[in-house]
């Protein structure tokens, strides 16, 4: 019982994404979407991925340990430079003011100019600011190698027009900047934008994907993606209750008739989000609804007489996928992956993991 991470799925998803036409710039932030930094990066590096993106310096150093020849881009603004120089990291330019303030640290550092087309997070907010950044790098002899953005509305409902404005803005700014400077790498398409294959992004050299690598889609279902994540638990108790009985803390659930319930040894303390209760769990292929709520250490199902203590329960897997829960509207796929605790036993399938993770199960 526990979580299984299928590294063969990660490997195959990478191949299928690249079959669309461009190499992968792999997003492995937040412990590779909480699937395990070392095994995921090792797998992708063995598959030929040579560009990785993270948000923090600590994450970048983890990637460097598993991918010695790769380019590792840190997207957060950097103010501490020891590991950047030691690990030969790439750094994103957060703004013109940041660039000028950090000038003394930038010799020998590969820089990526980020264009903020609408997220209001990091990057040049106007074409004039972007142009000033390029000019400053050229005047100072800095190594400006990359050009990028992030599309905040690529997977948003009812935002097609505004997303198109963002794409047009990036296409316009980036093409004009490329007339003034030669960039080795241009990366803009996140997973959702990769699926859209917008011809205005034809000048991009890479697709910078995250959630697709792990087998999930925040937009419409993508039937060629292979989910890399399964989670099973077990029934630890079975009870028959009478009509009027409450289940769990409080009075949120009251049995209307005599019922048989199963207690599961899993809850939000393990990272099982309460959003999961909107779809059934499965025991021996049969669907059983969650009742009451998901509590810290336990959850409850309404079951029949066939269910016994010790039965295996599929929380996520072949019958209910993370994307299925996402489409109930109660939690997105990245949120469900990242909520999970590593106190749950984990195992990996299909990879050459250098250092076995702790708390594995057999």
Image (cartoon, rainbow, N blue to C red):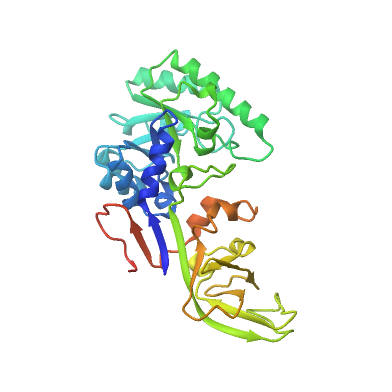
Residue 163 horizontal side relative to residue 358, left or right: right
Can residue 358 be seen in the rendering of this structure?
yes
Q: Quadrant of the N terminus?
A: bottom left
| x 62%, y 51%: residue | 327
- Residue 127 falls in which quadrant of the image? top right
Residue 101 position, x and y percent, is: 41, 32
Can residue 128 be seen in the rendering of this structure?
no
- In terms of depth relative to the viewer, which is nearer, 30 or 139? 30
Residue 60 horizontal side relative to residue 292, left or right: left
- For the image, the number of numbered tags is 0
| x 51%, y 24%: residue | 201
- Residue 69 falls in which quadrant of the image? top left
| x 28%, y 60%: residue | 356
| x 67%, y 29%: residue | 161
Residue 26 position, x and y percent, is: 39, 40
Residue 349 horizontal side relative to residue 75, left or right: left
Q: Quadrant of the C terminus?
A: bottom left
- In terms of depth relative to the viewer, which is nearer, 160 or 291? 291
Residue 91 position, x and y percent, is: 37, 35
Q: Is residue 215 above or below residue 300?
A: above
Q: Is residue 129 above or below residue 194?
A: above
Residue 120 position, x and y percent, is: 57, 36
């Amino acid at each position: 019982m526990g979580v299984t991470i299928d590294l063969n799925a990660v490997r195959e998803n990478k191949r299928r994404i690249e079959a669309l036409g461009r190499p992968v710039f792999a997003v492995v932030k937040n412990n590779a979407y909480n699937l395990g930094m070392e095994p995921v990066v090792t797998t992708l590096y063995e598959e030929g991925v040579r560009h990785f993106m993270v948000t923090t310096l600590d994450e970048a150093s983890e990637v460097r340990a598993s991918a010695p020849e790769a380019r590792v881009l840190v997207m957060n603004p950097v103010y501490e430079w020891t590991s950047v120089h030691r690990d030969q990291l790439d750094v994103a330019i957060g703004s013109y003011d940041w660039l000028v303030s950090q000038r003394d640290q930038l010799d020998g550092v590969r820089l990526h100019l980020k264009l903020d087309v609408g997220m209001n997070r990091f990057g040049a907010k106007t074409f004039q600011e972007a142009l000033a950044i390029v000019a400053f790098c050229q005047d100072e002899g800095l190594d400006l190698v990359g050009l990028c953005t992030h599309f905040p509305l690529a997977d948003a409902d009812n935002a097609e027009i505004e997303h198109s404005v963002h794409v047009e803005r990036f296409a316009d700014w980036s093409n004009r900047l490329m007339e003034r400077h030669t960039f080795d790498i241009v990366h803009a398409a996140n997973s959702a934008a990769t699926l859209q294959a917008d011809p205005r992004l034809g000048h991009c050299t890479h697709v910078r994907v995250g959630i697709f690598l792990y087998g999930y889609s925040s937009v419409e279902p993508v039937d060629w993606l292979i989910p890399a994540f399964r989670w099973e638990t077990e029934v630890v108790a079975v009870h028959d209750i009478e009509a009027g009985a409450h289940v769990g803390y409080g009075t949120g659930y009251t049995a209307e008739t005599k019922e048989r319930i199963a207690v599961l040894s899993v809850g939000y303390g393990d990272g099982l989000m309460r959003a999961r209760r909107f779809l059934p769990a499965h025991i021996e292929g049969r669907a059983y609804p969650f009742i009451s709520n998901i509590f810290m250490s336990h959850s409850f199902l309404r079951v029949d007489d066939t269910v016994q203590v010790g039965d295996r329960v599929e929380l996520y897997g072949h019958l209910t996928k993370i994307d299925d829960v996402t489409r109930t509207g109660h939690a997105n796929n990245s949120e469900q992956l990242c909520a999970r605790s590593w106190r749950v036993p984990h195992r990996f399938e299909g990879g050459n993991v250098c250092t076995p993770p702790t708390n594995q199960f057999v």
